[in-house]
Amino acid sequence: MLAVLRTVDLALDIYTWIIIASAVFSWLYAFNVVNSRNRFVASIGEFLYKVTEPVLRPIRKILPDLGGIDISPIVLLLAIYFIRQFMWTTLAPVLLS
């Protein structure tokens, strides 16, 4: 059971970094720091969008409109942090005892 918990924890950790990369990429794209016509840059942006948008879209529907500020990645990161802490402090002791 410990292997399953560690695998889920690793997957959540990787997804956390993908969310951060997506947020940074969106800032770079918005301020024209990266060349959006470059095929490699476009494929990275498309990948990050396809991986994060299905999870962020429902959060955006719930959050109030804050103008140009999108805090849905922060809300998702907080949810992932909560899940990881809940898994190790509540589930792990019960499942591993």
Image (spheres, rainbow, N blue to C red):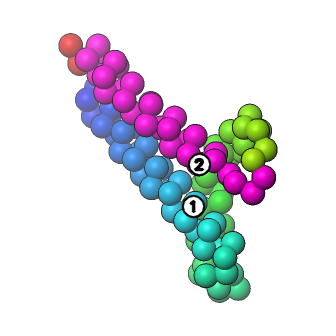
Asked if the residue under mark 2 is in contact with the one under mark 1, i.e. CB atoms within 8 Å, the reply is: yes
Residue furthest to the left: 97
Residue stretch in magenta: 67-95
Q: Amino acid at mark 1?
A: Ser
Label 2: element kind: helix
11 relative to 73 in the view: left or right: left
Q: Which residue is mark 2?
A: 73
Per the image, the residue denoted by label 1 is 22
Residue that appears at 67% across and 81% down: 32
Whether residue 43 appears in this view of the structure is no
User: x, y percentage for residue 57?
Assistant: 72, 44
State the residue at coordinates (31%, 27%): 88
Residue at horizontal 68 percent and vertical 39 percent from the top:
59
**Which image quarter: residue 63?**
top right
Q: Is residue 91 magenta?
A: yes
Residue 91 coordinates in the image, percent (x, y): 34, 19
